Structures are given as structure tokens and as C-alpha cells.
Image (spheres, rainbow, N blue to C red):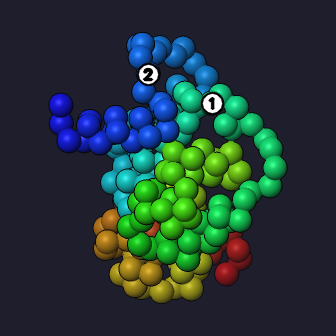
Amino acid sequence: MSNLARNGLYRMREIGCVPDQPVEFHGGEVVAITRQLLGELSKSDRGSVIAMESLTAEILAAMLDRQAFREGPPAPKWLTEALEILEARFQEPLSLRAIAKEAGVHPIHFAAMFRRHYGCSAGEYMRRVRFEQLSILLRQRVPLAEIALAAGFADQSHLTRFLKRQTGMTPTQYRTFLAFKTGC
């Protein structure tokens, strides 16, 4: 057994989630989240790692507790603080485990609570924040290389790939779209 598999089983035992029988799902939240996870495999941005970790943790949480994603009380303080971390440090290559550790909770619990309260994974949220920052900078006519660094991309080509996946447009095309949309 590989170290990765051993570590994964150890973490699952920590929270009491080692299935003793094969499990099969025919639809529902586990299948929907698994499809999102498969989609993440084709992405290669800084949000991919945290998105895949989040989605994997959500699958485990859904297997443990089908009630995990239902509405409930407001977000706990640790979760709103974790959200602030994501917003402040979206340019950094963060991991789900690191954010959960800062919040003082288990990564699976973090992932489940994040989706429950915010309607998306932490990785998806980081992409939204990055996209908002990108849109602001594109409106300001900042050079693309500067935008790439300010929005947390490795370089201009990484920014271009991200924007093409998100909008189907190059940065220049999206800049024109934004200018037209806002009347500038």
C-alpha cells in the first residue's frame, strides 16, 4: 500500500469513516461532487489543488452524514475567519488542510461546512475572488503581466488559460467586453 493510501486511510479512521463494504452511488450529492472533482482534474491553476481537496473531503462528509449540506444555523466564527483568509490570500497557493488547520478544524469538516454555508467549495470560492480581482484590474488597463501577478497567476499565459476557460475570451477580448458592458 502506498504512503498516500495509508495516510488517507489513517485520516479516514480519525473521523470514523472507513467503509467496511463497497459503496455504490446512483446520483445524488456524492455523484454530483464526484463529477466536479473529475472536472478539476483537467484544470491546472492554483485553485485546482484546494478545489480537489475540498471536493474529496465533501464526498467523505456526504458519505458520513447526508445531512451535512442542509441549511442550519449561521456560519460559525472560525468559518467566517477562514473565508476572510481565502479573500485576503487568494494569490497564494493555499491548501485545504492548511486553512482548516488555521481555523482549528478537521479538513473534512471544514470542506462540508464551507459548502453548506457558502454554496461552493473553497477552491471555487478562491477562483471567484481571483476572477473578480482580474476583472477590476482589466478595467483599469493595467498591463497583463502585472495583472497576472496581482491576481495570483504564475504568468500571463496562465492568466490567459484561466480566462479562456472561464469566459471563452482572451484577456484583450474580455477587456473589450468589460469596456462595452460598462460603457467606458
Would you say residue 167 is visible in this rendering?
no
Between disc 2 and disc 1, whose residue precedes?
A: 2
**Image x and y of residue 43, in percent:** 37, 49
Looking at this view, name the residue that lies furthest to the right. Answer: 73
Above or below, 120 relative to 135: above
Q: Quadrant of the C terminus?
A: bottom right
Q: Position of residue 158 (x, y in %)?
A: 33, 65
Check disc 2: other Cα within 10 Å, few if <14, some if 14-19, many if 20+: few
Q: Quadrant of residue 146?
A: bottom left
Q: Which residue is mark 2?
A: 19
Q: Is residue 160 above or below residue 8?
A: below
Q: Is residue 143 visible?
A: yes
Amino acid under disc 2: Pro
Residue at which label 1 appears: 65
Mark 2–mark 1 Cα distance, whole angstroms, equals 13 Å
Q: Quadrant of the N terminus?
A: top left
Identify the residue at image location x=38%, y=53%.
49
Disc 1 residue type (three-letter) = Asp
